[in-house]
Every structure is written in C-alpha cells, then in structure tokens.
Amino acid sequence: MEMIIRPRRLRKGANLRKMVRETRMDKSSLIYPMFVREGTGIREEIPTMPGQFRYSVDQMPYALEELSKAGVGRVMFFGIPDHKDPCGSGAYAEDGIVQKAFREAKKRFPDLYLIGDVCMCEYTSHGHCGILKGEYVDNDQTLSCLAQIALSQVQAGADMVAPSDMMDGRVGAIRARLDENGYTETPIMSYAVKYASAFYGPFRDAAGSAPAFGDRKAYQMDYHNLREAVKEAMLDAEEGADILMVKPAMSYLDVIARVKEVTDLPIAAYSVSGEYAMIKAGASLGYVDEASIICETAASAYRSGVDIYLTYFAKEIAGFMDEGRIG
Ligand code: PBG
C-alpha cells in the first residue's frame, strides 16, 4: 500500500521512541512535601495517605536521608503544631514546629533545598487560612501575619517560601517584609492558582486543618474558571512572585497549559493528597498498576507545561527515572 507518512515508523523500538520523546523530565524538578510534627520518636503513617508519614523533628533526618539518596534534593515542609489558637501564632513562633524543622534540616543537610508552605490553616483553632472577622476571613489583617510567617521561616533556614493561603496581595506583602529584613534574594513560589478542591481531603486529615465551619470557597478559586487563573497568575507575577504554582495538578492540566502560555515565569504544579490517595487506593485494590499510573500521571503534568512538580511520589518517580521508565 502506498503511504508516505507512517507515524508508526517512529514508534518502532524503545531506543527510537525515547529519541523522539517530546516531554523530558528530570529529578531536579521534583519537590517532596513533608509533614513535621511536635514530639519525639514519632513516625506515624497518615491513614488516608498510606506510605506517607508525620515525622517528629528527630525522625525527620532518616526520611531526608532517603530522599537525598534517591536524588530528590528539594523538600517542602508543613508543620503540625500541638497547640492552635484563633490567630495561628504557632505559625510564626521562633520555636514553632516548622522553624525547628528548618533549623535541624539546614544543619544536617546543608545541600537540601528547603521550602516553607506559608499558611495559617494548620495553626488556627478554626482551621481557616487567615484571621477571622465574624465568620469571614479578613484579607488585609491576614497579610501581616503571612508576611511574619514567611520571615520567621526564612530566619529559621528556609531557602524559599510558598504562600498557599489565597489572600489578595500576599505575595507583595511577603516580598516587602523579606526585603525590609535583608532577604532580597529569597524567592517566592506562589500558589497563585489554587482551586477550592476536594482533592485536599487527605491533607486536611494529615494536618488536622479542615475548617471547623464553612469551606474555603471565599478565598480559593472556583473550579469552573480558567480565565480567572490568568488573572491570579498575572497579579502574583506583578507582585513579585518568582515561580507560579497551579494546584491541584490532575484535573487542572488545561489550567497549567494556559498559565504557561501567558507568563515567562517557571510553572509549578502540586499533585495533591487526593491524587496520591486515589492512586494508592486504586492500586491496593488491584484495579490499576501503581507504578504505571504514577509515571503516566507525572508525564501528563510535564506534558501540559510544568517545570516543577510537587508530589508525594517524588522518591518513586526519581526511581522510575533511574530505571529509564520515564524521563
Ligand atoms: C494550606 C495547604 C493545603 C494544601 C497545601 N497547602 C490545604 C488546603 O488548602 O486546604 C493541600 C495539599 C494537599 O492536599 O496535598 N493551605
């Protein structure tokens, strides 16, 4: 049969397929999110996230060691405090849980790149991401707290801060506070485009940060919206964000592709707890093959335009890259 163009020619054999691959990924783009809690000798598995743990600061180095060995050199810390109050003061306490984790990690692993999630919901008694006025999160009053949280994390050893609260103007407020204190070189990775998502469910179990009343729809984005993603991304870029994040990743690949088009900043995507939990659950029932699904999901995020990928599967993905399964 006469046929000049045969796409299958380039699919013949693994060697050739790899040569013409359009999406290439690298371990240096992986960030591992990690939960640290008060106490000692604790490494407790998170029930809704099998294979993920809450570590006390003394146990954390073992996990960091494993990550480093796997070639994952970037970690984001989430703190789980013992005590919460209405203004989330544990988030910026000098001896707060995340501050202790940064100091210890910096001392033990000077080459690891440490990132702080800047938010209040793990630290407030009501579980919302800011200061309440009645039942509404007061935007402008929250800004100063967020700036203080970012500053205290950087003072404790964070190399980068990542605000995830979705208050308006927080990137600008954090930039100003860091600059005033001499941290002009510390980058901000903004959770610029963060949707109000049911995919955060397992995280809220892990961190005990579910809102005590209502939901987060008055500050996180409505998942029906795409043009608003561009608006949020551009605003954060103008306020001085160095990296823009889209969150969640799965189900939001169109958003990643769109944001990538409109900015020249690096784009990160966070494959969140619910994505992890679904893959784990499906695989444990034998309905899907875990390794294959992890690889395919990761590749889809990169294919849509992601430069940086935050994932609880960071170590596994690094392993699959070593094996040449993806990358
Ligand atoms: C804090 C924060 C959340 C996540 C990251 N930072 C929870 C939320 O917004 O409710 C979710 C991460 C995940 O689900 O893995 N605001």
Image (cartoon, rainbow, N blue to C red):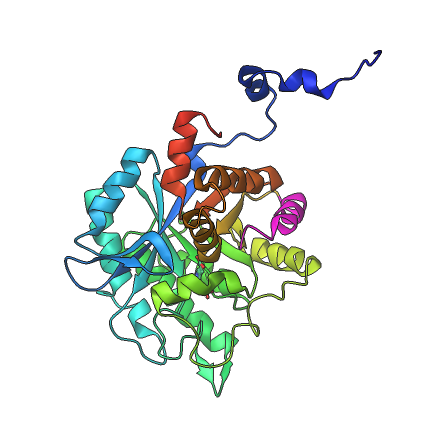
Whether residue 92 is situated above or below residue 53 in the rendered picture: below
Residue lying at the far front of the rendered structure: 286
Residue 248: image location, x then y, percent: 53, 55
The mark tally for this picture is 0
Residue 144: image location, x then y, percent: 42, 71
In this rendering, position of residue 25 left or right of residue 126: right
Looking at the rendering, the quadrant in which ligand 1 lies is: bottom left
In this rendering, position of residue 144 left or right of residue 169: left
| Residue at the (49%, 44%) spot, across then down | 288
Whether residue 119 is situated above or below residue 245 in the rendered picture: below
Query: Is residue 110 in view from this perspective?
Result: no
* 313 is within the stretch colored magenta: no
Magenta span: 248-263
Viewport quadrant of the N terminus:
top right
Front residue of this view, candidates 25 and 136: 25
Front residue of this view, candidates 22 and 230: 22
For residue 98, which quarter of the picture? bottom left
Q: Main secondary structure of the magenta part?
A: helix
Residue lying at the far bottom of the rendered structure: 134
Front residue of this view, candidates 87 and 208: 208
Residue lying at the far top of the rendered structure: 2
In this rendering, position of residue 27 left or right of residue 64: right
Residue 199: image location, x then y, percent: 50, 60
Whether residue 3 is situated above or below residue 27 in the rendered picture: above
Residue 56: image location, x then y, percent: 21, 58
In this rendering, position of residue 16 left or right of residue 289: right
Query: Is residue 284 in view from this perspective?
Result: yes
For residue 48, which quarter of the picture? bottom left
* 262 is within the stretch colored magenta: yes
